[in-house]
Image (cartoon, rainbow, N blue to C red):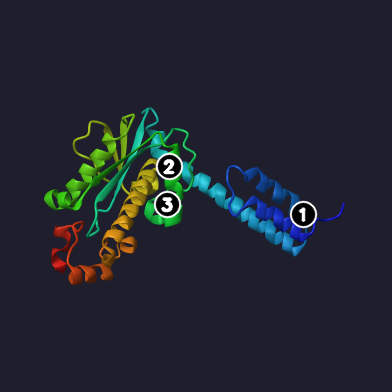
């Protein structure tokens, strides 16, 4: 039987895609098995590429299983909710909390601490989480309230609001590092929880994408401050703009008093 041309084999690999997934795992394995005996250098390079893509996918499967540790440990609870916040440190904008109940058989890959993901990957995962989650709740506390009650209390308030919006209500809360006052459910605070629990990681992604999009909207209203790029954090350009133009209504007065 005639050997396939290298160009034909390359087209097969391209058709499989740049990443291995649940849908194409079998085809990647078949590609490797079909061509690993072909001694041509170009073909061996393509086999090595396919092997790397398959290894990366299988490593991600393993990592995702490892961050279901707490969900498995508390599996007797029906609705397990992950909670995280974003926006405690910025000089402007709200603090936003996300609360997410994932299905028990959750099959979403690449969930992680939102800060470890690219903006494009967060957007992609946000859509998948919103589609597959049992329920998602968001809580917002704005600058005036932050100035009034302090950022820690404002964070708790945002988290309580996020949980209150869930339907069904959770019977267990997995929190990123904190215990939230005033909630009846059992709570499990987990240090660096957004990288250790798939539910908290999902909440961190939803909160981060929501807040980033909000800050991009504020950028249209207050273009001098660079909110689309700095998201309200204290970059040099942002601080210079505060000093030049003064604060906006979305600035936290207690956070910027040293710059005025």
Tally the numbered discs. 3
Q: CA distance from mark 3 to mark 1?
A: 39 Å
Within-10-Å neighbours for mark 3: few <14, some 14–19, many 20+: many
Label located before the other in sequence (3 or 2): 3
Q: Residues within 10 Å of mark 1 (few under 14, many from 20)?
A: few
Mark identifier at residue 1: none
Identify the residue at image location x=29%, y=35%.
Answer: 165
> Residue at left 62%, top 45%?
25
Left or right of residue 47: residue 129:
left
Splitting the image into 4 quarters, where does residue 23 fall? top right
List x then y, in percent, for residue 52: 61, 55
| The image quarter in which residue 116 lies | bottom left
- Are the two marked residues, 3 and 2, in contact with CB atoms closer than 8 angstroms? no
Please tell me which residue lies in front, 199 or 17: 17
Considering only vertical position in the picture, is 152 above or below 235? above
**Under tag 2, what secondary structure?**
helix
- Residue 220 appears at what percent x and percent y? 31, 60
Q: Residue at x 36, y 51 (%)?
A: 209
Which residue, given by chain and number where applicable, does mark 1 sit on? 37
Q: Earlier in the sequence, mark 3 or mark 1?
A: 1
Q: Which residue is mark 3?
A: 122
**Residue 193 in picture, x, y percent from top left:** 34, 46
Q: Could you tell me if residue 214 is visible in this image? A: yes
Residue 151 coordinates in the image, percent (x, y): 19, 51
Q: CA distance from mark 2 to mark 1?
A: 41 Å
Q: Which residue is mark 2?
A: 129
Q: Residues within 10 Å of mark 2 (few under 14, many from 20)?
A: many
Q: Nearer the viewer, residue 59 or 204?
A: 204
Q: Quadrant of residue 67?
A: top left
Q: Nearer the viewer, mark 3 or mark 1?
A: 3
Q: Residue furthest front?
A: 221
């Amino acid at each position: 039987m005639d050997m396939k041309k290298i160009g034909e084999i390359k087209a097969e690999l391209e058709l499989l895609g740049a990443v291995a997934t649940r849908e194409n795992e079998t085809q990647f394995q078949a590609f490797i098995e079909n061509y690993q005996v072909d001694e041509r250098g170009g073909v061996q390079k393509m086999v090595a590429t396919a092997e790397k893509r398959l290894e990366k996918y299988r490593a991600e499967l393993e990592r995702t299983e490892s961050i279901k540790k707490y969900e498995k440990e508390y599996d007797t609870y029906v609705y397990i909710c992950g909670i995280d916040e974003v926006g405690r440190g910025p000089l402007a904008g709200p603090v936003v909390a996300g609360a997410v109940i994932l299905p028990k058989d959750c099959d979403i890959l690449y969930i992680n601490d939102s800060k470890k993901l690219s903006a494009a990957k967060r957007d992609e995962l946000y859509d998948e989480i919103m589609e597959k989650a049992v329920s998602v709740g968001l809580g917002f506390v704005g600058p005036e309230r932050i100035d009034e009650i302090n950022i820690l209390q404002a964070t708790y308030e945002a988290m309580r609001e996020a949980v209150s919006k869930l339907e069904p209500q959770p019977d267990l809360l997995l929190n990123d590092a904190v215990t939230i006052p005033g909630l009846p459910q059992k709570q499990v605070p987990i240090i660096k929880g957004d990288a250790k629990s798939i539910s908290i990681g999902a909440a961190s992604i939803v909160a981060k994408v929501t807040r980033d999009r909000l800050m991009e909207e504020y950028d249209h209203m207050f273009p001098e401050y660079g909110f689309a790029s700095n998201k309200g954090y204290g970059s040099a350009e942002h601080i210079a703009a505060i000093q030049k133009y003064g604060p906006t209504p979305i600035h936290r007065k207690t956070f910027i008093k040293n710059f005025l």
